Amino acid sequence: MSSRNEIINDSDLVYIASDVAIEPLIDNWYAWAHLVSPATAAMNIKNRHLSIMESYIQNPMIHAAAIKNPKMLGGPFIDYGGKRVEEIKKMKEQTEAACEELLELSQHLDELNKLLENEAKGYSLEPLYPKVPESLRGLVELYYDLNNNPSYRFIEPLLYRTKYYKEELQAVNLFRVRDDDSRSFILSTPSLPEPDVLRLNLPLKSKKIDTLFETTNSPKPYGALKTLFEVNDQQEPLFRSLFTKEAPKRYEKYDKKGVLTRYFGHACILVETKNTSILVDPVISYGYESDLSRYTYEDLPEEIDYVLITHNHQDHVLFETLLRIRHKVKNIIVPKSNGGGLQDPSLKLMFKKLGFESVIEIDEMETLEFADCAISGIPFLGEHSDLDVRSKICHMVQFKDNFKMIFAADSCNIEPRLYERVSEVYGKVDIVFLGMECDGAPLSWLYGPIMPNKLDRDKDQTRRLAGSDFQESKALIDIFEPTTVFVYAMGMEPWLKYISSIKYTEESKPIIESNKTIAYCIEKGIDAERLFGEKIIEYGEGTGVPAETI
């Protein structure tokens, strides 16, 4: 790692430092998928952001105490130690002004729900269209399900073309990450100015971001970058501190006939053949000194052929990582949404709006054929609190000689008969990556702000964002008969603290259940491991057997 006191002149060729983070923001809050799509953004700003800020203004010390309580991890508490109340008060006022139209949209969605509840009684919905709030007319279709329950769907491509998609609310923070403990949980705390953080007000689709991070491997003159970002004299010392003249370590392209698989942490896997690179659910650590070995951005190829997204949750669609590597990515493959449901915004539309050029949707039981591999969409059950969310898929990657691996992420095998049917089509799978975070937060933790009515607590607690337990994992393993099982996506890596509120002990259910799974596999002669930190495995050509494990 380069010295932060390095002298850099305007004419010097510079690289972005390996520990520089780009933190995407929407209306001063950490950007995640439900803040991009206009309808979910409106509901979260009204029912989450304003509510949290008002609570902090009224009782800042309650928030300060809650942050220190491990049982409150991930809760709706602002992490400023009970201080900076006046700044939060001002931010709340600015939000109410800047987001006036979005707050109006959220109000009109409440009115639409009441309209359907009160007047849609099984008769034709045609007379209700003139009663739809004006801001929503032409943007929604009303419908009944087959049990005559009324609902609506958005014409989402049109919604993005209205005044409700507000790129002017977008910005990024740039700063250097010191260590695994330097960032606390970020999803419930708005971003206030900090002396060591550079705020740039630009849309997340901006090509300037790509130009900046192209310097990961290809240096550019510092003066040209300063001019590009219109850095003023006050910002310049902080901007300059983001760069180094020291070249990164050279990436060595995989050039053998087999398949190289590397674990980057959580659900992030890099798979490489001689001709193709595939990156699954990118969540990547920055490069800084640490006792825990891990792969970082310096360990990625200069081009990534396919990024695979398994589902639309914050720890799998992490814009912070995706923006940093956008210049490398040739294609993103995403699951299809349910076609306009509030709870299931389209990932394809979202990525297109955020500047990703080639976004490919994959459907259940659909196969995309490429030069030396094929990618199939395998149905993904559970983990979404029984809501109608379709933007979730398990990716099966098949290489020549029928060598197959499946990325099951957080899929919960609540109906084993499904995978029995899938195996009848695709056969056995050599490598299974299996998510076993089987506690999971309740429904309201993620989806509460968009629900028209608050769910009773006892019901809320049963509908959780949870992956497979031992029995569900065992059933899946018995069906696909893999040679190797990797338990992953557990949220355990310390560099995930800022997006994950997970903290396990040996008594935690996911640890107990995954230990049972690993023991079961070993008993059956299946190689098995719970991944943590980093892992590299090379599979020999045509064998499905590890040639080398590190």
Image (tube, rainbow, N blue to C red):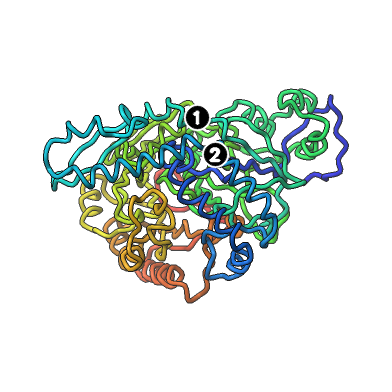
- Distance from the alpha carbon under mark 2 to that under mark 1: 9 Å
**Label 2–label 1 contact, CB within 8 A:** yes
Q: Residue at 69%, 40% (x, y): give it.
A: 174
In percent of width and height, residue 278 lies at 48, 39
* SS at mark 1 in the image: loop
Q: Is residue 121 visible?
A: yes
In percent of width and height, residue 219 lies at 73, 29
In percent of width and height, residue 492 lies at 54, 61
Q: Residue at 34%, 50% (x, y): give it.
A: 452
Give left or right: position of 183 versus 312: right
Residue 419 vs 272, above or below: the answer is below
Residue 110 vs 170, above or below: the answer is below
Q: Earlier in the sequence, mark 2 or mark 1?
A: 2
Which quarter of the picture shows residue 216? top right
- Residue type for callout 1: Phe
Say how many tags the image has.
Answer: 2
Q: Tag on residue 137?
A: none
- Residue situated in front as seen by the camera: 164 or 532: 164
* SS at mark 2 in the image: helix
Residue tagged by mark 1?
A: 356
Q: Is residue 259 visible?
A: no
- Residue type for callout 2: Leu
Neighbor class of circle 1 (other Cα within 10 Å; few <14, some 14-19, many 20+) is many
- Residue situated in front as seen by the camera: 229 or 188: 188
Which quarter of the picture shows residue 56? bottom right
In percent of width and height, residue 430 lies at 36, 52
Quarter of the image for the C terminus: give it. bottom right
Residue 179 vs 164, above or below: the answer is below
Residue tagged by mark 2?
A: 322
- Residue situated in front as seen by the camera: 300 or 87: 87
